Amino acid sequence: MSDLLERLRGRGWRMTAQRRVVAEVLDGDHVHLTADEVHARAVSRLPEISRATVYNTLGEMVSLGEVLEVSTDRRAKRYDPNAHQPHHHLVCGQCGAIRDVHPAGNPLADLPVDERYGFMVSDVEVTYRGLCPNCAPTA
């Protein structure tokens, strides 16, 4: 059973066939699919699943805190099942590919107190941008 399915079951989430398929499609490392991509993959496993069901299921998973909604630019939101391991994102500026990265250190600690302007900072989102190996010009 996938990690995401186990986490959802542990929360007592009712596991319908549609919900199961969406969770299975999202499972894995470096998964950052759009809702339309999730729907397309889900349809190949369960042809009768509707786009609305996929959107609603993704929304529920985000509300539960089991999936992250990632917006890295003006493109469609993507859904990241890696919600319980702190990480940042590496994004290709050309094709939009996204990878999870786990750099050493604590970015919250790197923000000096005098640069917080009285904010009680509770979270940090870091996005590294560049070109992936497929899009980078070869030398």
Image (cartoon, rainbow, N blue to C red):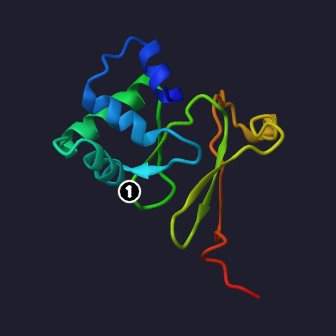
Q: Position of residue 103 (x, y in %)?
A: 78, 45
- Image quarter hosting the C terminus: bottom right
Disc 1: which residue: 76
The answer to whether 102 is drawn above or below residue 18 in the figure is: below
Residue 77 left/right relative to 108: left
Q: Position of residue 36 (x, y in %)?
A: 31, 53
* Residue 112: quarter of image: top right
Q: Residue at x 56, y 36 (%)?
A: 82
Q: Residue at x 60, y 28 (%)?
A: 84
Q: Nearer the viewer, residue 64 or 126?
A: 64
Q: Residues within 10 Å of mark 1 (few under 14, many from 20)?
A: few
Q: Position of residue 83 (x, y in %)?
A: 55, 32
Outermost residue on the bottom side: it is 139
The amino acid marked with disc number 1 is: Ala
Q: Residue at x 66, y 45 (%)?
A: 88
Q: Nearer the viewer, residue 112 or 41?
A: 41
Q: Residue at x 65, y 31 (%)?
A: 85
* Residue 52: quarter of image: top left
Q: Nearer the viewer, residue 28 or 75?
A: 28
The answer to whether 68 is drawn above or below residue 43 in the figure is: above
The answer to whether 133 is drawn above or below residue 129 in the figure is: below
